[in-house]
Amino acid sequence: MSEVVIIGGGLAGLSAAVNLADANYHITLLESRPRLGGRASSFEDAATGELIDNCQHVIMGCCTNFRHLLRTTALEHLLRPEPELYFVEPPESSRQHPPRITTFGASSLPAPLHLAAAFRRLSYLTWRQKLALARGLSTLARSQPDTSDRRSFADWLREQRQPVDVIERFWNVVLVSALSESVDRITISAARKVVVDGFLAHRDAWEMWLPTVPLDELYSNGLAKWLTERGIAIRLKTGAEQLIESEGRIIAVELRDGTQLPTDDVILAVPHQRVLSLLPESLRANSDLTKISQLESAPIASVHLWFDRAIMPLPHAVLVGRLSQWVFSKNSHGNTDNTSHAYQVVISAAREVAVRSTNDVIAEVVAELRTIWPEAASAELRHARVIMEHAAVFSPRPGSDELRPPQQSPIPNLQLAGDWTQTGWPATMEGAVRSGFLAADNVRQRGGLARRGLCPDLPTSRLARWLLT
């Protein structure tokens, strides 16, 4: 039986393991941390004893391969659909207290008209601004994706004469949340992927799904159990030191304790910052792979708050024009302490937050919540903490696609996996899952097995094809 070693227990590595679970391989999955999930993981907060996620993870309807992963492993029931989004108008637009909240949801019309009424309801945009937004959406949808275009999306927005308020109150809100970067550091093709594939092409693509349990229960428990039941060996707290090469192939993985695991195939599914240090000497000077070191990272901050009462009647909200970008109620995660109510505020592209004191960030976030919901103004903050992921995702900067390698490395039995590889997607959970499936398919093909392939994208509606091409 052939030996396959998967290095990395994040979504890319887990997806590769799921793909190979029914094949005749002996699979060992190595994870240096004490839990699976990589950046999509949880840990216990010492003050409350609760499992909290390092960052809120959101799945959209267009994430077909991520959804397939959860269906395959019988975990899709741990997601709940959110058929509506709630946009809180920016402070400068509010003529009343509390500020207005716009419900954003789809009508019964086919795509791309299904969200037309929702866009019209955005109370903080004028009719002139909405018309400019409609022109921008139409022009972007009709453009052809070009990953070699070195213009930033901010350049494109200026060329399209998008008003400053539309950029700040729509484009920034949507794209920073989806790509964790500001529009001046985003490629046009990445922006188009989010807006067209995520909102316009199919009526279900924009729908948001949220985990109903901490991410640790989803991956370290549910997915790990599914894998071990199928004979896959999962070794936590086991870090890889380097790959051992002989005669043009990887023959073993050397662990940090000096032991070596012989192997026939390796899937290297670690963050891009770690790849070069693990490669054998012959690959560290490979020009296609050394480009990985030029990929830049973007930070994401999560502010976890515990109040003595519920502070908002919504499951989540999008906060426009504030430091806080999203707020999620976490009380569905099984908090049994009825005297404490947990919330998570997410701040993407969080470079400003990274250089500020924790107390200052918490104070500003809490102040923002108290200006929106009267319940928050009278609630007692019992506990708070900030989690900063300094290298949460790679930045989809102009030229970044040229730095992303394919899953097949120059060594035949070494595959690369991670959202930073060539997936056709920006840095998302969907991209990570796709990379794992593609890397595992390369292993299957080497072993004479049929490739499984990726799940197809949601089909573009007939009306969308006619209107947007």
Image (cartoon, helix red, strand yellow):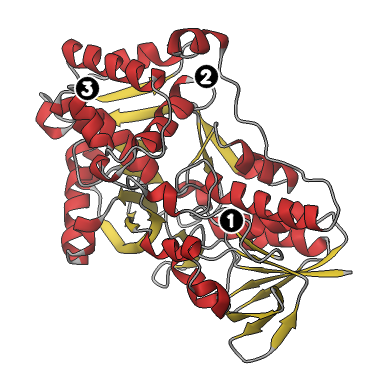
**Residue 160, which numbered label?**
3
Q: Residue sitting at 42 percent across and 25 percent down?
A: 144
Residue 313 lies left or right of residue 42; in this view the side is left
From the top left corner, tell me how far across and down residue 16 is, in percent. 68, 56
Answer with mark 1 or mark 3, whichever residue precedes in sequence: 1
Quadrant (top left, top right, bottom left, bottom right) of the N terminus:
bottom right
User: How far across and down, in percent of the image, does residue 88 sit?
Assistant: 26, 31
Q: What x and y, as percent, mark residue 264?
A: 78, 71
Q: Is residue 436 left or right of residue 153?
A: right
Residue 51 visible (yes or no) = no
Q: Is residue 281 visible?
A: yes
Residue at 12%, 25% in the rendered image: 96
Indicate which disc residue 203 carries: 2
Residue at image location 16% in from the left, 52% down from the top: 364
Question: How much space separates mark 2 and mark 1, taking CA atoms?
Answer: 27 Å
From the image, tell me which residue sits under label 1: 11
